[in-house]
Image (tube, rainbow, N blue to C red):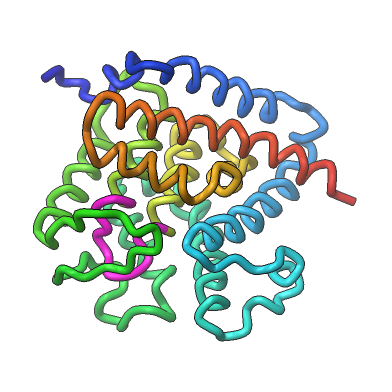
Amino acid sequence: MPDDVLAALVDLPGVAESLDRARAAVDSVLWDRPMRQRASDIAAGSRLRGAWATAAMDGAEVRPDALVSGDALDGSPMGNVVTAALALQAEIPRNVDTFTKAPLQVISRLHAVVSVDFAAADDRGRIRSGAVADDPLRLPALPSADEASARLTALSRLLVTSTSAPALVVAAIAHAEIAVTRPFAWGSGLVARAMTRLVLAARGVDPDGLTVNEAGLFAAGRSRYTSALRGYQSATPQGLAEWLVLHADAVRVGADESRRIFADLP
């Protein structure tokens, strides 16, 4: 096995082309001068729409206007998921610098934030100790707690290891590893989807968080998202390619979403 374990993934069928399209879409946003002048407003809108979309992927789909008005944050089980998603989005920018040096620390921090209404204080930010985890996507083959812990540790090492693979590949692997291993008793999916934003920000692809990859996933649909994660679980070339292509497509569509945010600004 080559030392750079991520680099070979670019050669899987369809992956390089999808990565190129996604990166071009993100760059077109970053190079757009009028959009750069409203970057802080677009980033705020991106976090809001990202929170809505990632909560919806876990089944907590509310009216977008209810999220904006705050009516969705009503203390109901669905409202609490939306509240958790909003808190997670707010936490991501504060942890980008630390993520480049101590990714496991940041992953634990994000879980501590997102699980406030769903886990006991002693369990927040901690890897599950049992064989039960929430599973909104109905993924198969939950790894044991020991395997989940080992894989999360291995992922944290991978994230600080030099690679020639594009940041989009790194982000896709970080996202999928947490999504399929479900290292936390609650909230692994929300934390997994946050990895795309974190990696792209930390590696300079989208440093201000203007794009909305979560909206790209929502547009693809839960069934395609779940199918692609199952493909990743299979560890076959075809399955890995399916996941990498879907992830890149979500980022590309998320760049288009940032343009809609800009168009809606007063």
Residue in the picture at 20% in, 68% down: 128
How many marks can you see?
Answer: 0
Quarter of the image that includes the N terminus: top left
Give the percent coordinates (x, y) of residue 199. 43, 39
Name the outermost residue toward the right. Answer: 266
**24 to the left or right of 2:** right
- Residue 240, by quadrant, is top left
Q: Against 253, is 44 above or below?
A: below
Residue in the picture at 27% in, 52% down: 104
Give the percent coordinates (x, y) of residue 40. 71, 47
- Residue 138, by quadrant, is bottom left
Give the percent coordinates (x, y) of residue 86. 57, 65
**172 to the left or right of 8:** right
Q: Closer to the camera, 264 or 104? A: 264
**169 to the left or right of 122:** right
- Does the magenta-highlighted stretch encompass residue 181? yes
Q: Against 169, is 53 above or below?
A: below
Q: Against 97, is 48 above or below?
A: below
Q: Closer to the camera, 111 or 131? A: 131
Q: Closer to the camera, 121 or 179? A: 179
- Does the magenta-highlighted stretch encompass residue 50? no
Residue in the picture at 52% in, 64% down: 85
Give the percent coordinates (x, y) of residue 256. 69, 35
Task: Write down the region rendered in magenta.
Answer: 179-189
- Residue 89, by quadrant, is bottom right
Residue in the picture at 14% in, 71% down: 130
Q: Against 88, is 266 above or below?
A: above
